[in-house]
Image (tube, rainbow, N blue to C red):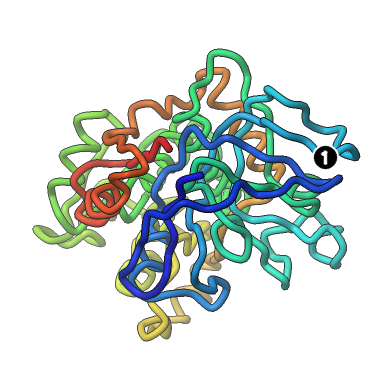
Amino acid sequence: MKASVFTGIDTLELVTLPLPAVDDDSILVRVRACAVCGSDIRIFHHGNDRVRPPQTLGHEIAGDVVRTGKNVTKFKESDRVAVGADVPCGECAFCEAGMGNNCPINYAMGYQFAGGFAEYVLLNRTAVSHGPVHILPGGMSYDEGALVEPLGCVLNAMELAPVKLSDTVVIIGAGPIGMMICDVAKKRGASKVILINRSSPRLAMAQKLGIADVYICSGDEDPIGRVLAETGLGADVIYTACPSPEAQSDAIKMAKNRARISFFGGLPKDRSVVPLDTNIIHYKELIITGAHGATPVHHGRAVDLIARGTVDMKKYITHKYPLDEIAEAFRTAENHDGLRVVVNP
């Protein structure tokens, strides 16, 4: 099979590999779509402790089951499936409590397990038994199936910092994930959704899609003052969907009393210590939570939302490339030339 292999910092090699062998408890999936995530780009440039080169990246996957082990009963050959990132071990205290994305082993597709930037991907016993693998309903495309994973992450964040009817919601960061948060917040009954971004081109893309009610370019105006002007008392829920320390600091200053704040976007390791005025948190009784990844339950719910048309993921797919052009796919995603970039091996 053809595969794009991460062999070291800033290096992807298109190689021919043996087809992975299926044992009694695993399945082999013919990859039809694998979307490029920001974490793939970070691994490409900076590496990751959980990724040992040579490794195939990619964790937003959809394809066809083509082989199954004799002990596998959950899936059969010809099933169309979506595969997410975080694979619970299924045995630790966190996994038993339904918090597989907090598993201390922290298995993931495209990290310890070979990912989807290849013609085929093997799902081992752990992934088959405990992982985010769900059958795609008829009529749902492989490209949409690849975007189940990021939508699942949005659902996890919204479970931890819920949007209630008539809430005013602020999202800082107008990337595809930030836009998805806007989308789901609207579906949950938010009365006003405010989208903030540092540069205007992304905001223009969001505005063209009608994602939010208010668009604020923080490079041109004070986002805190504008949010307070738009809301009066501040926002009920705020998500920082960007790798920005300033966004986290700003979030607590634009929050209403007892607001829910989600630090959704992770920060660079050398900028992760952020000065916060904790008196604001104290006196406003703010609720601040982190959010990372998703559980298999969130992944399954995301499949359902897309299949029912509740969330239209097709509008987020702006570029598609064959596996041979994965370097260009990475460049397009990194340059923010569009929204979600999908590779079709």
Residue located at (33% from left, 68% from top): 11
Residue 74 vs residue 19: left or right? right
Q: Is residue 250 visible?
A: no
Above-or-below relation of 16 to 314: below
Q: Nearer the viewer, residue 290 or 286?
A: 290
The local secondary structure at tag 1 comes to: loop
Q: Residues within 10 Å of mark 1 (few under 14, many from 20)?
A: some
Residue located at (18% from left, 46% from top): 337
- From the image, tell me which residue sits under label 1: 69
Q: Nearer the viewer, residue 345 or 158?
A: 345
Q: Nearer the viewer, residue 66 or 240?
A: 66
The percent position of residue 43, horizontal first and vertical second, equals 42, 68
The percent position of residue 274, horizontal first and vertical second, equals 39, 82
Q: Nearer the viewer, residue 18 or 156?
A: 18
Above-or-below relation of 206 to 287: above
Looking at the rendered structure, the kind of residue marked 1 is Gly
Q: Is residue 142 visible?
A: yes
Residue 320 vs residue 30: left or right? left
Residue located at (25% from left, 56% from top): 334
Above-or-below relation of 164 to 20: above
The percent position of residue 342, horizontal first and vertical second, equals 37, 39
Question: Residue lying furthest top in this view?
Answer: 139
